[in-house]
Amino acid sequence: MRKWVNRLLQNEQAGLLLALILLCVVLSFLSPVFFTALNIKNVLRDAALVAIAGIGMVMVILLGEIDLSVGSVQAVAGIVAVAVLNSFSSVFVALGATLFAGACIGLINGLLITRAHINSLIATLGMMAILRGGAMVSTQAVSIQGSVDSFVEIGTGHLGPIPIPVLIAFLLLALFFYVLHYTTFGRYVYAVGGNPQAARLSGLPVDRIRIAVFVIAGILAALSAFILASRLNSGQPNAGLGFELQVIAAVILGGISLTGGVGTLAGAFIGILILTVLSNGLVLLNVSSFYHDIARGIVIILAVYLDTRRKQSLVRRMLSGIK
Amino acid sequence: MAPVIELRGVHKFFPGVHALRDVDFVIEAGEVHALVGENGAGKSTLIKIIAGAYTLDEGQLEVEGVSTVLSHPRQAQDLGLVVVHQELELVPSLSVAENIFFGRLPNQNGRVLWKKLHADARLLLNQVGLAVDPKTQVGYLGIAAQQLVEIARALSQQAKLIVMDEPTSALSPQEIDRLLLLVDQLRFRGVSVLYVSHKLEEVLRISNRVTVLRDGTKVACQKTAELDEKRLVALMVGRELGLGFPDANRSAKSVVLQVENLTTDSVNDISFEVHEGEIVGFSGLMGAGRTELAQALIGVDRRRGGSVRVGGEELAHSSPQAARRMGLGLVPEDRREQGIFPRRSVRENASIAALEALSRWGWVQRGMEQSRVEASVERLRVRAASTETPIANLSGGNQQKVLLCRWLLVDNLKVLLVDEPTRGIDVGAKDEIYRVLDELAQTGLAIVVFSSEMEEVLGLCNRIYVLREGSINGHYHREEATPEALLESALPN
């Protein structure tokens, strides 16, 4: 028992996990609705969208880069999904086209960063504006409606009691957990983010890893867009406004360091859950939506602050253990 | 007169390490006190305690007879304890004068008094014997001159004790002479100097007393007059050492690395060859192009012309990755910036270049990785709590060994380039690294050593090339190489 407690205290994610549990406990006292199966399902369904795009963001930030284009990808990929769906009447073709669009966007991001040597903040900021504008122009700022019934199943359907988006998110989280920790590619991602110069001199394909990560991030962002479009049964040019910040905030809250090379997917997932539960709680408590952003900002700053403090005290505890 | 600083019964702990054990340490006013010890012996910890960067966990600290708790570098500086760091801490874009009085510019109601600043700076520059205009940007000065600027800054703070941490590691022989002369003058003016260096010859030449640390314990504090190099080395490593290099009687076989007319932006028309089982050295002064050549060989810089062949095959594609696949690896000069992944474990640091071979379908075979890393770590006698320890927790010498492991794990490694194999590493660990390089050469590996330490090149290599201004300006076989000859080829005419 003691051993378990110690291990929990030394675990990087323990503080976050405790915060999440605490938040849930408080909310279930404040709102009778919070701890119901339906609401939990809703929370998880919201979290799933952030998590799917968040996996890509985790890898991008582990590299020491940033991707601001994921919000606009929500719009563009969603429009592609519905447009292709309507002309081919096939969910599979639509899915393929959407993921392909995401991959292309990611590839362009990656090439801008590695070949044109443009800082990722600037490159993806540019892409963010271009894609959003493109979405508006191509639809003339009007959302397009889906015309295939089975399409909505993906966003709203269930497999047993589990919503399909949640299932997809969990499968992807499991897959990428293994990729990051047990494959050469995952090791390379941590290495390039931890010390790009050393990675290069050790003969790692640094640029190819960067490009691959941006492509994966693009595909995952497009997948979350596809699910969102399916849930709304429409492609909307203003979908995902501010989504990139929501994703970045959540994974940073989860301990992914902006300096690169530090953090785990598990931590990021807890970060995503905390922010989703928080938004959900504020909705249940009838707090005006304008306050949501304020609350989110405060939580992130607080979390990072506490995390730094906790690391310092951990070192101190280890020291006293030696004496 | 009370000593400048006195430590009594000092202990310092870090995670997993008892860095200082019950250390007593005294620096008298106006003495040059040398501090020596192997890497990881506790020298940097002791310096940082004096500089106020670390607080001591147990024991007492007195500054000029007054018991003090130093909790911040600023506080130490105010008491006149100033450190001139190994990595200089100047602002390259500011002038010499602004650097000297950084944060303390003479001013009237916030308006900087430039005339006074420059006059004061000139005075201090005279004292340290540096003849530059105080308005010069620091970035244009060489390392030796920058160091003198740092010392001038220390003097401007009314320093009572100047700590010099490896001050001569990047200096030429003449510059070293000048620095040692300055140290002597400082002593004459009543400023104490704590001289921390691996170069025992300098220590014996300049200091009044020497303190030797080993594994965090003070093993000796003696008058320099009573010591010689052999005795010092024995104190540092705890045993008498032959300070010898392995016998370089290796049998050279076929050519494995052939370089013809290699030219980049910083090296010019380089041609040489290295045989199987041979250690070849590149010597030369600061800025002669040693590091640039090492990096050009693995394709970091764009090649302007020439060819590199490894094992008869042309390295057509110029990139470190292509070089690695051909069996050409580099252990870089700057361990921290270019070598290690500080947050990752010893295991991950060691295996990173060999992961392709240690994985199947992209999945790392953990068992195989673990056993291969453990074997190589054991072979090079890396001292670490376990292979899961973050590499940043290791001493410099052990980090260097892990970087050697990184390339030893690459199966088809044919040529190992080592840039400054023992920079910042001390006698005991140095010897071990020489021995390892020799063993590797015996097994048929071709090794190229790039080093600023002439003694190292002379002792270790079968053949030596001397670089000057980016070109090869001399080639010696072991038998004909002498320090004089190498220096002759290295100096600009």
Image (cartoon, coloured by chain):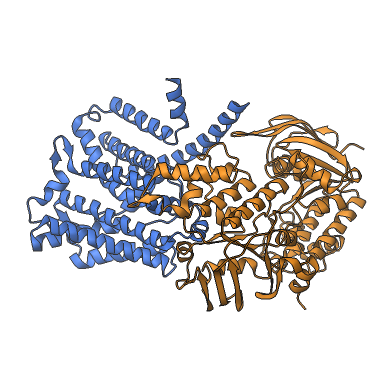
Left or right relative to B95: residue A231:
left
Residue B316, above or below A132 = below
**Which residue is painted at 72% across and 52% down in the image?**
B85
Q: In this image, A99 relative to B164: left or right?
A: left
Residues A97 and A238: in front is A97
- Quarter where residue A60 is shown: bottom left
User: Looking at the picture, does residue B430 appear above or below residue A122?
Assistant: above
Choose between B176 and A273: the one closer to the eye.
B176
The answer to whether residue B213 shows anywhere in this view is yes
Percent from the top left, x then y, of residue B83?
75, 49
Examine the rendered structure and indicate whether residue A98 appears above or below residue B310: above
- Which one of the lettered chains is coloured orange? B
Q: Which is more toward the observer, B403 or B190?
A: B403
Q: Which residue is the extreme one toward the top? A: A1
In the rendered view, tell whether residue A294 sits above or below residue A198: above
- Among the chains pictured, the one given blue colouring is A
- Quadrant (top left/top right/bottom left/bottom right) for the N terminus of chain A: top left
The quadrant of the picture occupied by the C terminus of chain A is: top right
The image quarter in which residue B459 lies: bottom right
Count of picture labels = 0
Q: Residue at the location (77% across, 35% down)?
A: B218
**Left or right, B313 with reference to A131:** right
Where residue A165 sits in the image (x, y, percent)? 20, 44
Q: Where is residue A307 drawn, in percent x and y?
A: 48, 38
How far from the left and from the top, in percent, is residue A269?
34, 41
Is residue B120 visible in the rendered structure shown here? no
